[in-house]
Amino acid sequence: GGRVPKVFCEWNSWPLPWQPATSPRHPAMLLSLGKVLNAARYGYLTWEWTEGLRGSLFPLFFASLYKGLQLLSRDDVQWLIWLPRVTQALLSALADVKLYSFAKSLEDGETAKWVYFCQLCSWFTWFCCTRTLTNTMETVLSTLALSYYPVEGTRPGSRQKCLALLALACLVRPTALIPWTPLLLHQFWREPRKRPLLLSTYLPVGLIALGGSLILDRLFFGRWVVVQLNFLKVNVLHSLAAFYGSHPWHWYFSQGLPVVLGPHLPFFIHGCFRAPKRHRVFLSVVLWTVVVYSTLSHKEFRFIYPVLPFCMIFCGHSLRQLKRWRGAACTFLLIANLLPALYTGLVHQRGTLDVMGYLQGLCQTACGPAPASILMLMPCHSTPHYSHLHCLLPLRFLECPPDLTGNASYVDEAARFYTDPQQWLLEEFSNTSLLPTHVVFFNVLEQDISSFLGTNGYTRSASFFHTHLPQGRTGSYVYVYERN
């Protein structure tokens, strides 16, 4: 086996100026991984990393930030939590400026101004741009690459810079190639000297990127791994992502794209009809991407985040055309986007973050004679765990890796627990000396495990609001019970 650093590694991180979570399956991946690359002694390695589905480039970026904090003797928990968010926010801001520059090269400063306005007031941009999602970095790098893309009627951009940034985006997340397929084919079709373009530009950039990825991942995993191939096999050929939920084929058309666009939807549709014909290639990017993702069973809003800047080009054209109603349209966009941005940023699903601040206070017992221990009885990856604790506390949580062996009767740990919570606890803690000092769960579970809690001397020590929209195993509040 490879000498992979021990780490708690999950799908994404948390926002910059506000405190909500994303959907319960997606807490912080990269804060933990970056920390472990700097020799942390705690953590947990999820199945995506043991199977080599994730490349090391993106977490290595955050590891370098952590190393800088360590050299400056500033590696305390608040710096470790907030610096990646601030960095991601600055990179997203740079991408927004580059989108403005690209729109200006397409048309003129007036249209570019409205494209920029639409991008800045998008609620989904606010929601995602500061999170250390791989999707966010994919969007940032894709937008930066777009700013160098040569378009008809404009001065040619730098192909090498464009392709290099696209290659980086693909190393962060291989799906970055999906929206760029129409753009690359369009560029190749228009190029009179196709063979030199392929052999002296496309091929060298691709080989250098793939070679660099192989070497970097060889150092990280301790074995030769082609993460892009593994990503394709697991998510597309074997469709293991469907283990975490599936949606009908039309979901991106009926829900995904309308929600991501939000109040911009009517302006996007209007802009599609009013934009110049030469911009049809950007509309093809949006439609192609949504169609490709629609063929996959597992669907999420964040997957189509990279097409949002393309959509804003058409929204900007729409505002440019609405001379009489432009003021009212801008006011509508500001207010209609501000409300969901503030709610999802300040209120919705904040409990799983707030509870980590409370649990972080237990770190002072880590080196004492009676250290605290924590049991998380929540849906998989509900909290950022060690990435927000940054101390050596015993922490157990329910796991839900998919079956990779083809066992038709496979049931993950979380599913077994929720089938009969009381029985699962009795079996796991038949030896009362193994009981944790703290148990964390959503309020909807309280009735099911009340007998276990009362018998073993647990009382509620803290409660944190989570959401106004509880669903299934996710409740309105997060409870912390402490053993007396």
Image (tube, rainbow, N blue to C red):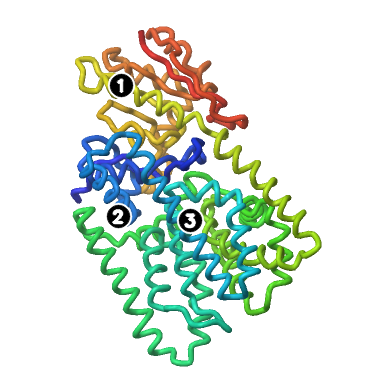
Q: Nearer the viewer, mark 2 or mark 3?
A: 3
Residue type at the position of mark 2 = Ser
Q: Amino acid at mark 3?
A: Ala
Query: x%, y% of residue 51?
Result: 31, 51
Q: CA distance from mark 2 to mark 3?
A: 24 Å
* Label 2: how many Cα within 10 Å (few below 14, some 14–19, many 20+): many
Q: Amino acid at mark 1?
A: Ser
- In the rendered structure, the answer to whether residue 222 lies left or right of residue 427 reads left
**Mark 3 vs 1, N-terminal side:** 3
Q: Picture coordinates of residue 183 (x, y %)?
A: 52, 75
Disc 2, SS? loop
Up the image or down, 147 lies above or below 241; here it is below
Which numbered dot is residue 56?
A: 2
Q: Quadrant of residue 402?
A: top left
Q: Residue at x 61, y 67 (%)?
A: 112
Q: Residue at x 41, y 45 (%)?
A: 85
Tag of residue 373: 1
Residue 469, image x, y percentages: 62, 32
The disc label shown at residue 93, or none:
3
Badge 1 crowding class, 10 Å Cα cut-off, few under 14, some 14 to 19, many 20 or more, is many
- Which residue lies at the image location 32% right of the left edge and 21% below the top edge? 362
Looking at the picture, tell me which residue is in the foreground, 10 or 343.
Answer: 343
Residue 237 figure quarter: bottom left
Q: Toward the viewer: 55 or 114?
A: 114
